[in-house]
Amino acid sequence: MAVTVVGSIAFDAVKTPFGEREKMLGGAAVHFALAASFFDEVRVVGPVGDDFGEAEFEVLRTRGIDVSDIERVPGETFFWAGEYGWDLNTRETLDTRLGVFETFEPKLSQAARDSDVLFLANIQPDIQRAVREQCTGARFAALDSMNLWIDIARDSLVSAIGAVDCLVLNDAELKQLTNMPNTVKAAREILSWGPPAPNAVIAKQGEYGATLITAGDYFSLPAFPLEDVVDPTGAGDTFAGGFVGYIAANGGNGGDEQVLRRAMAYGTALASFNVEEFGTERVARLTGDEVAARVQELERVTNFTDAPVTLRS
Ligand code: AMP
């Protein structure tokens, strides 16, 4: 079993009310891979530029991530700069430089093509589709995207969504994509697009958690209650890494609601570590025991079945 991920491999410049970093390792595929590596073998597909050094590769290798599908090409690594508002709920993108992604045409190794689980992390939808087409045997595929691609490449994004089992977007993006003002309605609209269409939609809701919507069911978890959040960059990708990684390790094609629910819990736990420090800093030295403890605590804080029921008719 193995998970292949394609998406941005980046340098990020981030400013939050609690500090800033001018150039740190980031990117959707990187955050995803670090989280998913707690469950299964992970292969990262994508290009990096001349500026991507051994120290950055080492962060991935230390977690056992297979970097042989990362191509080094002349040019600059993808660069993103963003700044957060005072409560970290708003974020402004200050700069996006695609760099080596501008001309990237993915050619997956046989091992990556043979992966049984695939994650199309945030990047141009044309690249996501090209990878999906090379990895047709995957038993479970999921996709994340963002407002930029809904704005400038909507048709390509819609066809990419039609080729996966699960769509992961934030609330606002789901509403923007469907032009619907309600998250549940927007998700059910996407589920009805097919065939082919995903059979699960996850709405990421930042500090408020995440919601899973399937044709006949609904499940929601709050974010893990943290008092000190330092940098939310990559929280969504880390959530996806925990979610998809759990499904990779525990079988299935996303059709089992109970598997999806537990996967949500792992995604939530992993994401909560990611936001405690800048970039990949916290997750890079995380342990499996810490993840397990946080999932257990999440179960406790969301449980309300142990008290008696008194209800008048
Ligand atoms: P998140 O906070 O989960 O939305 O993910 C932030 C990560 O996404 C950062 O590490 C960025 O490098 C990366 N990112 C930002 N904008 C883009 C974009 N247009 N395409 C792909 N990745 C991006």
Image (cartoon, rainbow, N blue to C red):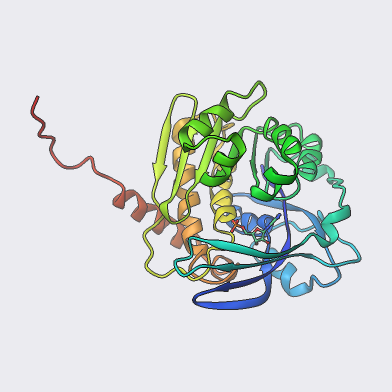
Q: Is residue 78 left or right of residue 303?
A: right
Please name whichever residue, 123 or 117, is drawn nearer the observer in this view of the structure: 123
Rendering quarter of residue 135: top right
Query: Relative to residue 272, is residue 193 depicted above or below?
Result: above
Image quarter hosting the C terminus: top left
Q: Is residue 239 left or right of residue 63?
A: left
Q: Position of residue 67 (x, y in %)?
A: 76, 58
Rendering quarter of residue 83: bottom right
Please name whichever residue, 223 or 63, is drawn nearer the observer in this view of the structure: 223
Rendering quarter of residue 283: bottom right
Residue at 58% in and 71% down: 281
Q: Position of residue 304 (x, y in %)?
A: 24, 43
- Count the marks: how many? 0
Q: Position of residue 209 (x, y in %)?
A: 43, 50
Residue at 48% in and 65% down: 88
Q: Position of residue 57 (x, y in %)?
A: 74, 67
Query: Relative to residue 101, is residue 95 depicted above or below?
Result: below
Q: Is residue 107 left or right of residue 266?
A: right
Residue at 86% in and 70% down: 50
Query: Relative to residue 298, is residue 49 depicted above or below?
Result: below
In the image, farthest residue toward the top: 195
Ligand 1: give its quadrant.
bottom right
Please name whichever residue, 39 or 205, is drawn nearer the observer in this view of the structure: 205
Query: Relative to residue 153, is residue 148 depicted above or below?
Result: below
Q: Is residue 263 left or right of residue 176?
A: left
